[in-house]
Amino acid sequence: MITPSQPDQLAWMGHRKGSREYRRILVALLGAGIATFAQLYSPQGILPRLATDLRINASQSSLVVSAATFGLALAALPWSLVADRIGRIRAMRIALVAATVFGLIMPWSQSFGFLMVIRVLEGAALGGIPGVAVTYLSEEIHMAHAAVAAGTYVSGTSLGGLLGRLVAAPIADEFNWRIGTFTVAIIAAIATSVFFFITPPPRGFTPRPVSVGQVAHAIGGHMRNPGLLVLYGQGFLLMGGFVATYNYLAFRLERAPFHMPVGLTSLLFLAYLAGTVTSRVAGDLASRWGRGPVLLGSTGLMIIGILVTLSMSLPVIIIGLVIFTAGFFGAHSIASGWAGARATRNRSQSASLYNSWYYIGSSLFGFLGGIAWLHLGWPGLVTMVAGLAVFAGIWALTTCLPDRHQEQH
């Protein structure tokens, strides 16, 4: 069994909110979040341009996003093994450098096949960030502030995703999608440098030899735990619906009656700012009310928001998108932080499992949403997304809430 057995860890309680090290950790992870999610999602806002350039349809173009998230999903657990052996910070540094290299190569792919290979490799490199970062937070931050810190980190990831889309799309409109995504990769390189220089030395974990068999045993234990399995399921279902919505929104808005150019539709990603706020707010509310009620409330907001986007009025669609995005990031910040905190041991593997299922959902439903869009239009996609959220909510209601009193500590 993989357990934190080092004696010095028993006395370590974590950095408290307001301390210099606490602030440095959050700034460092902001840099990591920007570098990761700007690269991961920069093609999402320019899929119509990419589809035209490579002569593929909307569903095929979504594979540019799904390939990276699939690579991330496959690599998240192996990265947890690496992080246990060499340390969290070293693992994240290696991951960020590798991902940035692939990000700088990706825009110059001359064929759809080569682009898919590079995106899978880029996603696999990025797999060393999300789960490891959440585990790092749980080890370095005092448990009284862990939910708030996790929410702050998720806020940073939403900013990274927003930045990647907002930078790539206008440049793609002015020049082409290759210049747009290359610019994002340069920004990611700068953010990676921030992470290198500002991260404080770790105190809550000491690297140790861990075997593949130990990791497999830990994974099996987590997957048999209903309380953890429901959290992995939240990531799988809710992220799937979230990515599907943003993948195909630009395709809808470039058609009648909207006729919006890609550079303009990319501004709708400003709805991510709602997620930046709710990620942090959800952490604060969870400290007072417990994680379960906040998770359910956030999922309810997602359902309301996606149904509002059925309107043919652009201002109403934007309102619905903001509500939907706010709900998603609230739910994600709770579920991701809970997956690490709820595990009494082997937290690295638990956080990585959450991220694996999260990105498997992104890859699978991001593609299936395209089939719904091509055959049933926007109502078909909304039905799929709302159905995923309803199922996730029912699952959480029957599994998470009975433990809310115990889990809020």
Image (cartoon, grey):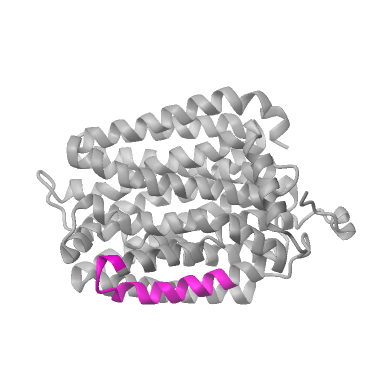
Q: Is residue 217 left or right of 49 when viewed as pictured?
A: right
Q: Is residue 222 above or below residue 42?
A: above
Q: Is residue 262 magenta?
A: no
Give the extent of the magenta segment: 94-113
- Residue 15 at x, y = what percent? 75, 58
Answer with the quarter of the image where residue 257 lies: top left
Say whether residue 107 is magenta: yes
With 251 as the anchor, is 321 left or right in this view?
A: right
Helix, strand or loop for the magenta stretch, by majority: helix
Q: Residue at x 51, y 53 (%)?
A: 155
Relative to 283, say whether 262 is above or below.
below
Count of numbered labels shown in the rendering? 0
Residue at 68%, 57% (x, y): give it.
Answer: 212
Residue furthest front in the image: 213
Give the camera-side residue of 260 and 344: 344
The answer to whether residue 250 of the structure is visible from this angle is: no
Q: Quadrant of the C terminus?
A: top right
Looking at the image, which residue is at 30% across and 50% down? 247
Closer to the camera in the image, 62 or 172: 62
Q: Residue at x 25, y 60 (%)?
A: 46
Measuring from the top left, give residue 77's x and y in whole percent. 59, 55
Residue 209 seen in this snapshot: yes
Q: Position of residue 281 (x, y in %)?
A: 55, 43
The residue sitting at the left extreme is: 256
Image coordinates of residue 340 in percent, x first then y, are 66, 46
